[in-house]
Image: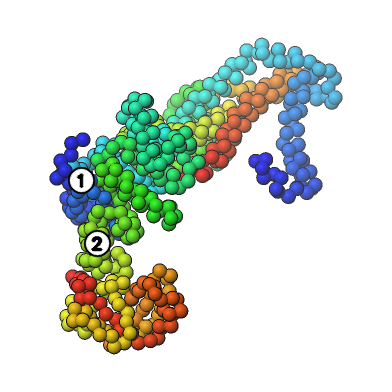
């Protein structure tokens, strides 16, 4: 908010330096990746760059295994997000609208998967899937990802429900709308931005997931796993860097939009009551 | 809508609503006349809002039936009842502008767009919000949101309009203005209004009839003047306005019978000691214990000789604050017309 910045006291030099230091600490590694996508020397990280080339982009484009992994990751993320949107919204609606025995526990259990270490979720899913004799496949990856994607959507939608007036639903029914019409004309528009934000976050989480994927995948290689496997092949390093740059972009955009939406929504809806 | 005018708009037949062990509404019988402005008055938790919610369909009776113009609606969902509600928190849809909010009921009924626009304009004019159709609810003041909520309900021409403490969130000036406006709108549209409030002044100002609720039951139904001047129970006498309740020993000494009676503070005349009064009047002497000067009037607390005390209110027609405050501690004679005393059963 530009209007407040002028009225706030100026930050001290130390604080400014600390803030910049933190930002550098977080972002310098990513710049390195970006920088070395242009190096002609594939094996070492020499500085300054021995030259400048864009040939690795062309090489990356022609790698069929890379494209397979990318498509797989996008598909998994899309479907896991879709499942999460439906299940997360339903769970949030149930916890918000009705009081039932064990409601608080269910709320807690829903949020637990995101707090649990991925390794635990991973091994648990692997045992369960193995125990049920389900072959490890595309769908087992999707199920694995959906477990934590549901939480993200659930949290976002529940927070939005708590901010909206409960009598709005009654008002809609009072004005002649049945449950379906009420959902379509009143509930959905009110949670739309929460769904978008939650969905984008879920997509981004799924897209770069490694741990749970390692436990639930069969022969499939998602993009993060493909990148991981490239570590043992130093001659391909610039190709990996190209992919990493691409992943940074593909993750950055939805997260950026999701944050923007949530911020806007909290600005405008705070005073609607 | 062909409503037979003699059929009650709303009829309750032994309606109860229990929440666990709590009898929120306890075997209520009630008839609301076609076209009247009816208020449900009572303290919070007295069952008035639950009654309203059962008429709207948000709540179902545990037992008993509710009739809307003769039709049993006890188990119909809200969207199948020809009643509309104005909510306490307005419950406007924040993602729609004022015009779309008002048009919502018509949109659901698939009324054509042109017809919708025309009726929205009419309604906004009725509630004095012409030209506001494009605004968002968040851009309106509390009073304006209130009017939008009213327009949104009235546009559907409901058989009965329910108002759930709609003026509660407004400041005093605006509330008084809205009271008059609501009453005018009701006369204009001729729809039965059922108004829930805990504010007795509001109920008295606007209503044709009032039902006073207490602990899930109706204590008294009547016109504002009946409720005020002839309270049927000690609860009504105490809840609606201020009353002096005199019972037992004191009642016997004053009135010759130990039947409880009430006398309104403004009906008592505060005179000087030894003042002569006619035989149709009751007179007693006492000492002024306390004086509160309130501008328009003054409230006195008088200890009666022989025990008990009475609240007396006198308008400051000729007296100033200096005059009234100097009376404190003095002996006075209180008197009132016998006809102003109301005998109360319990």
The answer to which quarter of the image holds residue B153 is top left
Residue A230, quarter of picture: top right
Q: Residues within 10 Å of mark 2 (few under 14, many from 20)?
A: few
**Relative horizontal placement of residue A164, taking residue A246 as reference (left or right):** left
Give the number of the disc on residue B225: 2
Q: Secondary structure at mark 2?
A: helix
Q: Residue at x 52, y 31 (%)?
A: A196
Q: Is B210 rendered above or below residue B296?
A: above
Specify the label residue B34 is tagged with.
1
Q: Secondary structure at mark 1?
A: loop
Q: Is residue A242 visible?
A: yes
Relative depth, front residue between A158 and B32: B32
Q: In the image, is residue B241 above or below residue A205?
A: below
- Chain bearing mark 1: B
Q: Quadrant of residue B39?
A: bottom left
For image coordinates 39% across by 52% down, the residue present is B177
């Amino acid at each position: 908010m530009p209007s407040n910045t002028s009225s706030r006291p100026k930050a001290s030099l130390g604080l400014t330096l600390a803030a910049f230091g933190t930002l550098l600490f977080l972002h310098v590694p990513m710049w390195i990746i970006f920088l070395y996508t242009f190096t002609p020397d594939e094996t070492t990280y020499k500085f300054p760059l021995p030259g400048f080339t864009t040939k690795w982009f062309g090489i990356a484009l022609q790698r069929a295994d890379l494209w397979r992994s990318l498509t797989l990751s996008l598909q998994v993320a899309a479907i896991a997000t879709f499942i999460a949107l439906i299940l997360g919204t339903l769970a949030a609606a149930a916890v918000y609208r009705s009081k039932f025995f064990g409601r608080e526990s269910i709320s807690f259990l829903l949020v637990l998967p995101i707090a649990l270490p991925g390794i635990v979720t991973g091994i648990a899913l692997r045992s369960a899937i193995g125990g049920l004799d389900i072959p490890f496949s595309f769908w087992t990856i999707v199920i694995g990802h959906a477990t934590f994607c549901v939480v993200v959507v659930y949290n976002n939608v529940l927070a939005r429900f708590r901010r909206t007036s409960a009598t709005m639903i009654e008002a809609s029914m009072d004005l002649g709308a049945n449950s379906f019409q009420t959902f379509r004309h009143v509930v959905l528009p009110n949670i739309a931005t929460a769904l978008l934000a939650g969905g984008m976050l879920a997509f981004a989480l799924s897209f770069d997931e490694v741990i749970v994927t390692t436990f639930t995948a069969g022969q499939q290689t998602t993009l993060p796993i493909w990148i991981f496997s490239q570590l043992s092949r130093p001659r391909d390093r610039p190709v990996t860097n190209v992919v990493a740059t691409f992943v940074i972009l593909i993750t950055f955009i939805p997260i950026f939009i999701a944050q923007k939406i949530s911020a806007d929504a909290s600005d405008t809806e705070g005073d609607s009551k | 809508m062909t409503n037979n005018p003699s059929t009650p708009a709303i009829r309750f037949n032994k309606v109860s609503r229990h929440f666990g062990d709590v009898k929120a509404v306890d075997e209520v019988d009630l008839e609301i006349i076609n076209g009247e402005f009816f208020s449900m008055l009572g303290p919070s938790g007295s069952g008035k809002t639950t009654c309203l919610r059962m008429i709207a369909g948000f709540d179902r009776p545990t037992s008993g039936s509710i009739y809307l113009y003769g039709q049993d609606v006890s188990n119909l969902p809200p969207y199948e009842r020809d009643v509309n509600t104005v909510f306490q928190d307005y419950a406007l849809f924040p993602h729609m502008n004022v015009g779309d909010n008002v048009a919502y009921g018509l949109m659901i009924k698939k009324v054509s767009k042109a017809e919708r626009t025309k009726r929205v304009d009419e309604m906004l004019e009725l509630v004095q919000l012409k030209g506001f159709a494009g605004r968002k609810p968040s851009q309106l003041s509390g009073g304006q949101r209130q009017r939008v909520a009213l327009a949104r309900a009235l546009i559907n021409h409901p058989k009965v309009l329910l108002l759930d403490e709609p003026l509660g969130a407004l400041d005093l000036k605006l509330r008084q203005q809205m009271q008059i406006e609501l009453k005018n709108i009701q006369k204009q549209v001729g729809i039965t209004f059922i108004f829930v409030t805990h504010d007795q002044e509001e109920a008295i100002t606007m209503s044709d009839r009032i039902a006073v609720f207490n602990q899930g039951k109706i204590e008294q139904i009547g016109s504002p003047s009946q409720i005020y001047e002839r309270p049927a129970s000690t609860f009504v006498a105490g809840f609606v306005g201020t009353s002096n309740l005199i019972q037992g020993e004191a009642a016997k000494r004053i009135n010759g019978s130990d039947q409880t009676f009430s006398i309104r503070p403004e009906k008592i005349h505060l005179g000087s000691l030894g003042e002569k009064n006619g035989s149709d009047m009751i007179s007693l002497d006492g000492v002024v214990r306390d004086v509160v000067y309130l501008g328009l009037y003054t409230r006195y607390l008088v200890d009666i000789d022989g025990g008990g005390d009475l609240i007396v209110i006198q308008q400051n027609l000729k007296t100033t604050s200096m005059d009234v405050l100097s009376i404190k501690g003095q002996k006075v004679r209180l008197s009132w017309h016998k006809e102003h005393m109301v005998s109360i059963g319990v």
